[in-house]
Amino acid sequence: MERWITLHYTLKTPERLDRFLSLQLPEFSRTRLQGLIEDGFVRVNGLVVTKNGYKLVQDDRVEVRIPPPAPTTLIPESIPIEVIFENADVVVINKPAGMVVHPAAGHDRGTLVHALLGYLPDLEGIGGEERPGIVHRLDKETSGLMIVARHERAHRYLQDQFRLRRVEKTYLALVDGRPPTPLGRIEAPIGRDPAHRKRMAILAADKGREAISEYRTLETFPSHTLLEVHPITGRTHQIRLHLAFLGCPIVGDTVYGRKRPTLPLQRHFLHAWRLKIVLPGESQPRTFQAPLPAELNAILETLRK
């Protein structure tokens, strides 16, 4: 349903229109508000303004038209998902290995987004995106915890929590060999691999984006090591690349590790185990945990014999 929001600029100092709206309407991302301005959905003193940098002056009257969500082409699917927690703002789920998070080329059905739309029809249209409610992702073969926003305000809040690095994520990874030290910190920039555009790579500082991971050893075996990994940043394939960079790639990772897995596993051994976050409207952090899937537990039990 379409709605209008009317605001008044009361300060004596001129201010950019997009900045003013982002401060007044925190439930929307600045990018979304800039899109509304550029598309002619904002009026100042009755006149349409399409420049984000338009300077407001004292006593300006600003009207913002919030259009109804564009109809999505995504078809909800009745796919079982394991819900760890839910309230009016968020849903925390345990994603299985083998499930793609959002639609992309070659994955137009059966994704987590399709399953979420089947479970929560109101997700349609959050952020006006084809990835409703999604604020972070896991690789297809990575299992474990993901948090999803149920409405626009929660979506913006969660985006800010991840951007400001206030979310603590803990992964379990079984690697080939062992890292050079029992615990450590990896700082190695990541960017698109210039030789393989579908892959990421460790790059020089001026060509890649900052990427930081911390790890500690939980258990050692003759040829493998179980690690607890904390990604400080959230780059694509970050943990997989950083551990391979140390010389101890994740077991089963045939892209960045060994082409032939050293253990009988049909996926890589990486699991988003724990998530600590302050939820919208709360002051203390909650910690969620997803146990290791059976196939990963079986591998560990075999190694312990």
Image: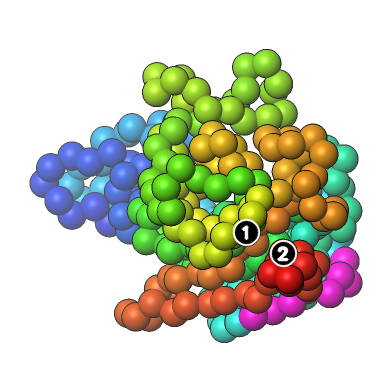
Left or right placement of residue 281 versus residue 151 in this view: left
> Please, what is the three-letter code of the amino acid marked with disc 2?
Leu
Q: Nearer the viewer, residue 116 or 184?
A: 184
Query: Would you call the spot at circle 1 few (<14 residues within 10 Å), some (14-19), or many (20 or more)?
Result: few
Residue contact at pointers 2 and 1, CB within 8 angstroms: yes
Residue 271, quarter of picture: bottom right
Q: Which residue is mark 1?
A: 221
Determine the secondary structure under disc 2. Answer: helix
Measure how far apart labels 2 and 1 are at the Cα level: 7 Å
Measuring from the top left, give residue 127's x and y in whole percent. 58, 55
> Please, what is the three-letter code of the amino acid marked with disc 1?
Phe
Left or right placement of residue 19 versus residue 183 in this view: left
Q: Which residue is mark 2?
A: 303
Which of the image's four quarters has the N terminus? bottom right
Asked whether residue 186 appears in the rendered view, the answer is yes
- Residues drawn in magenta: 77-84
Magenta residue check for 100 = no
Determine the secondary structure under disc 1. Answer: loop
Q: Nearer the viewer, residue 136 or 187?
A: 187
Identify the residue shown where x is 68% and y is 16%. Answer: 195
Which of the image's four quarters has the C terminus? bottom right
